[in-house]
Amino acid sequence: MAIIEVDGLVKRYGEHTAVDGVSFAVEQGEIFGILGPNGAGKTTTVECVEGLRVPDGGTARVCGIDPQRDTGELRHLLGAQLQASELPDKLTVGEAMELYSSFYRRPADWRALIDTLGLTGKLGTQFRRLSGGQKQRLSIALALVGDPKVAVLDELTTGLDPQARRDTWDLIEGVRDRGVTVLLVTHFMEEAERLCDRLAVIDAGRLVALDSPAGLVARVDDRQRIRFRPSAPLDHALLTALPEVASVERAGSQLVVTGTGNLLLAVTTVLARHQVVAADLRVEQTSLDDAFVALTGRPIDA
Amino acid sequence: MSALYRLTATETRLFFREPIIVFFALGFPPLLLVIFGAIPAFREPDADLGGLRTIDLYVPIIVALSIAMFALNSLCQLLATYREKGVLRRMRTTPVKPAAMLGAQLLMSTAMSVVTMLVALAIGRLAFGVRLPRQVPAYLTSYVLAAVTMFAIGLLVAALAPSGKSAGAVGTVLFFPVVFFAGLWIPRDSMPGVLRTISDFTPLGAGVQSLQDATAGQWPQVLHVAVMLGWTIVAGGLAARYFRWE
């Protein structure tokens, strides 16, 4: 049974329809991503799941619970990390953990949690003195202190430097390994590709695709591109004769071979047979970025 | 351990980490009382005041001042800041009701202002021989009424102000007329008739008179109780109507 079920969700703000009939189901133990550009309706969607907003149509269920009707119970099952929610400036990490664990019926061991998140050395540090990455880790800790079944993480790595972002990704995988189902909101392709088992791509309030990252890419295009600088002149016809190759173009000193299937093997075999060495060889595959453009008609950060 | 207890303890700890707020809320009112008491003329009985001394009138005013400081300086600014920074929003995702935060703030403000009241009464009694309240239940009733009234007004400011900074500014703007009519510059007994009538209808004008009456051994007047209840109902009702957690 799905742990989160969203069915035909609609949310309007005045004339504007922020979420327009979105449906998806998240299975237990998944990292499920909601991907889309800013303003696509991602946050509104998860806020309906979190019971922070009342949908105008459709339903959301978490562990079979209606977030609107049984909000009290939902709060024990779902831990949320929200965008732009801070703590009092002078509250220390330890005090925040102690305070938030007092809110729950069966809290997790907050000291162990803080240890996992690498904040043990910061227990006595005030919130205002934490770095962006440390604040985010504390935010994850607070979302998990109630020992939830589901964690909703909204734009967790926005504003973090690349190293802190990668560290956070490891932490999120760690969260899933604890048996927590993760609903992850993001507009970073790399993050979605690296972390998510499945993705719901949302654009302008509508669900445009729902698949694994690899599935999304494959659905759009399985075309690959190989670039290399041949060590000796090569007759293009040798390559175009291959069934895998769609086209061969010259770009300066480089050759660009486009095709499908096991393109790399086919091309390198021909090159080897003719004793041509491929220098600076690079294989470019359709990325999630390309898939996003194909699905929505524009790049995610446009 | 209960969430409300934890919240109150945590908020109290945070309060003590703001030395300037601590000074103005806890230290300033008693200090002012000591300064007034140091003026020799304030310690002379005055026939115009029915044989009372000016310092006798100032003890309830100082008690009212401390309530006003908590309500219009710390309480409203803190709650508006918490909303602005998403502290209340984060709390909404947990099983605790954000209203528990409100409860914790009110508990802490009440406890702290009671301490200031006791300090003011003690200084008045020990340093300047000011009579302690003769009607203790009446005094406590008046005190609670005045505190609840002012906290309701503080919450209304927090509800309407868009940010912590603007809540602080609005609180300060309200603070001066409120303590003026409580008699901080001219005690009510020295106010001209019109001014005193206006004062009767202000939250702390009514509050100070009730405290003064209880000190003299009488129960507060119906008018003043009604004025305080009226402010509480109107301000508290509007605050409840307009308060937003985010």
Image (cartoon, grey):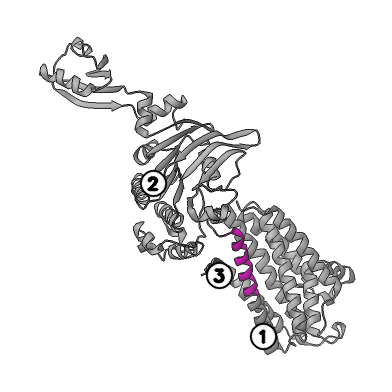
For the point 60% across and 63% down, which residue is it? B100
B116 within the magenta span: no
Q: Is residue A27 left or right of residue B217?
A: left
Nearer to me, B58 or A101: A101
On the same chain, marks 3 and 1? The answer is yes
Visible in this render: residue B10? yes
Q: Residues within 10 Å of mark 3 (few under 14, many from 20)?
A: some
Q: Is residue A170 above or below residue A6?
A: below
Please identify the dominant SS of the magenta region: helix
Nearer to me, B222 or A75: A75
Q: Which residues are magenta?
A: B96-113
Which kind of residue does numbered mark 2 sit on?
A: Gly
On the same chain, marks 3 and 2? The answer is no
Q: Is residue A208 above or below residue B192?
A: above
Numbered label attached to residue A29: 2
- Inter-mark Cα distance, 3 to 2: 35 Å
Numbered label attached to residue B122: 1
Q: Residues within 10 Å of mark 1 (few under 14, many from 20)?
A: some
- Inter-mark Cα distance, 3 to 1: 29 Å
Q: Is residue A88 left or right of residue A264?
A: right
Q: Is residue B54 left or right of residue A49?
A: right
Which kind of residue does numbered mark 3 sit on?
A: Tyr
Q: Chain of mark 2?
A: A
B107 within the magenta span: yes
Q: Name the residue carrying label 3.
A: B5
Visible in this render: residue A250? no
